[in-house]
Image (cartoon, rainbow, N blue to C red):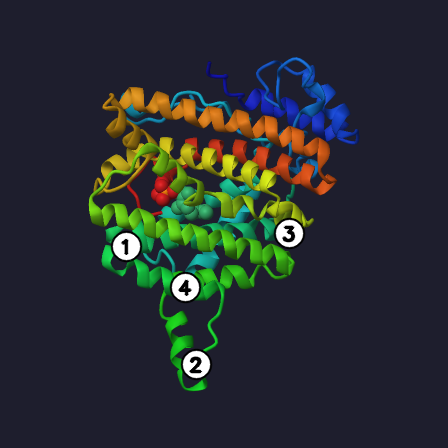
């Protein structure tokens, strides 16, 4: 069964409820959520599960609520060919829509991208992709553009690593250079300590490439907001992301389509997990390293990270279809393995996505009951991130037009 997606009408209702009534306990909040229209997923819905629901985080201050919500939402399909149109997904709605805040973050991000040199000559496409809007939608717990920008810089630097080194030949990606590019990119996040006689060259090497400049600066600019354990956590997630970029490069070099299980293992790591890892940083609190590393929490984050990235697979299919044909996404991998039609592969991919989201929902709700308040807040932030991520993907020009940003 595919659950209906909640739309802006429900999101506005939630935002209104939260803006006036969020002072209660998570339990009270869940009680209110129960009285909302049944289309709003807030936690497990089976008998006896009402106490174990994910409490949605309060949206940031009133100035960004309600009145600036977007006009009626677009249909839950892409404008691509019908066999790649995206069916409804089991996913929460975005908790806010504040175009002014999105634009502010987007413009600041553009200025930063221009300083670093990433996407030179393509900044208009970056503007149109509207990563500021992604941050605004996915992090409803703050309306501070500086905090949203800190996360946006990291995301854009990670995206640029993918575009420049892995995905996009028109941006200079070369399969044979992938390993050496990723190796040096890592040093932008975790500086090398060369013997003195090589220090100058090493420094010049870091400055010579816009992706390295962007990665280094995105980490440097986290410092006012993130403690050391949070920075270490992000570095670890991005290092794993780079390993998965190399994995994808190997499939290209081998001209091999991975098995579905193998692709899913990959997409857990080549995923938006680095974005999820910054949720507490953006919202101004710190989940302890011990809780983030708890295997149950890692599992929940991995489930959400994979699901949110499968949303990317579904919405970027049309763009990837138009590219060199060397892009991987779940429907393509499913179609190859199951020898089914593109439409059937999309439907199977949606089932996989929905299962992951439902599993996250149930397990996060249980963890919220047993973990610290910070963990509950973090998991609610992940849930909100899922809703913002899906909303951005279905509207972003990045997935409507030719690739490049
Ligand atoms: C923001 C971030 C962590 C990005 C790194 C991983 C990444 C580029 C994705 C998860 C998106 O996947 P894909 O390479 O398919 O991206 P596009 O469809 O080209 O946007």
Q: Is mark 4 within 8 Å of ligand 1?
A: no
Read off the residue under disc 1. Answer: 171
Q: Please tell me which residue is depicted at 42% across the width and 26% down the height of the picture.
A: 352
Q: Is residue 150 left or right of residue 224?
A: left
Disc 1 or disc 4, which is closer to the eye?
4
Q: CA distance from mark 3 to mark 1?
A: 37 Å
Q: At which x and y percent is residue 94?
A: 56, 30
Disc 3 or disc 1, which is closer to the eye?
3
Disc 4 or disc 2, which is closer to the eye?
2
- Residue 279 figure quarter: top right
Q: CA distance from mark 4 to mark 2?
A: 16 Å
Viewer-side residue, 392 vs 167? 167
**Which secondary structure, mark 1?**
helix
Does the image show residue 127? no
Read off the residue under disc 3. Answer: 289
Viewer-side residue, 404 vs 42? 42
> Which of disc 2 and disc 3 is earlier in sequence?
2
Disc 4 or disc 3, which is closer to the eye?
3
Of the numbered discs in the image, which one, if any, rests on residue 212?
4
Q: Is residue 111 left or right of residue 176?
A: right
Q: CA distance from mark 1 to mark 2?
A: 29 Å
Q: Please tell me which residue is depicted at 45% across the width and 55% down the height of the picture.
A: 239
Viewer-side residue, 91 vs 130? 91
Does the image show residue 4? yes
> Which of disc 2 and disc 1 is earlier in sequence?
1
Q: Is residue 382 left or right of residue 240?
A: right
Q: CA distance from mark 1 to mark 4?
A: 15 Å
- Crowd around label 4: few <14 · some 14–19 · many ≥20 (10 Å): many
């Amino acid at each position: 069964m595919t659950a209906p997606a909640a739309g802006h009408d429900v999101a506005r209702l939630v935002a209104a409820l939260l803006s006036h009534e969020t002072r209660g306990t998570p339990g009270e909040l869940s009680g209110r959520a129960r009285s909302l229209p049944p289309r709003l997923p807030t936690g497990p819905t089976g008998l006896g599960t009402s106490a174990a629901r994910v409490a949605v985080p309060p949206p940031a201050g009133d100035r960004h609520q309600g009145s600036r919500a977007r006009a009626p939402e677009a249909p839950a399909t892409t404008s691509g060919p019908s066999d790649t149109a995206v069916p409804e997904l089991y996913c929460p709605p975005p908790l806010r829509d504040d175009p002014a805040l999105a634009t502010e973050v987007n413009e600041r991000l553009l200025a930063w991208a221009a300083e670093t040199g990433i996407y030179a000559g393509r900044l208009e496409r970056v503007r149109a992709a509207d990563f500021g809007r992604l941050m605004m939608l996915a992090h409803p717990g703050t309306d501070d553009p500086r905090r949203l920008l800190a996360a946006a810089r990291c995301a854009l630097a990670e995206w640029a690593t993918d575009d420049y080194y892995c995905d996009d030949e028109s941006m200079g990606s070369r399969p044979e250079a992938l390993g050496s590019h990723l190796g040096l990119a890592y040093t932008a996040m975790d500086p090398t300590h060369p013997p003195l006689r090589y220090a100058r060259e090493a420094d010049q090497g870091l400055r010579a490439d816009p992706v390295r400049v962007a990665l280094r600066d995105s980490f440097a600019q986290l410092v006012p907001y993130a403690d050391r354990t949070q920075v270490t956590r992000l570095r670890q997630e991005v290092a794993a992301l780079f390993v998965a970029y190399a994995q994808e490069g190997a499939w290209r070099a081998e001209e091999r389509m991975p098995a579905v299980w193998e692709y899913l293992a990959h997409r857990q790591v080549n995923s938006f997990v680095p974005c999820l890892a910054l949720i507490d940083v953006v919202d101004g609190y710190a989940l302890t390293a011990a809780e983030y590393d708890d295997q149950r929490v890692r599992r929940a984050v991995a489930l959400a990270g994979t699901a949110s990235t499968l949303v990317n697979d579904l919405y970027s299919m049309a763009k990837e279809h138009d590219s060199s044909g060397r892009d991987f996404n779940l429907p393509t991998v499913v179609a190859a393995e199951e020898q089914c039609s593109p439409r059937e592969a999309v439907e199977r991919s949606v089932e996989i996505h929905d299962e992951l989201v439902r599993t996250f929902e149930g397990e996060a709700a249980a963890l919220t009951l047993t973990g610290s308040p910070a963990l509950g807040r973090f998991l609610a932030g992940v849930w909100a991130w899922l809703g913002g991520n899906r909303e951005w993907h279905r509207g972003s020009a990045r997935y409507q037009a030719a690739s490049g940003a």
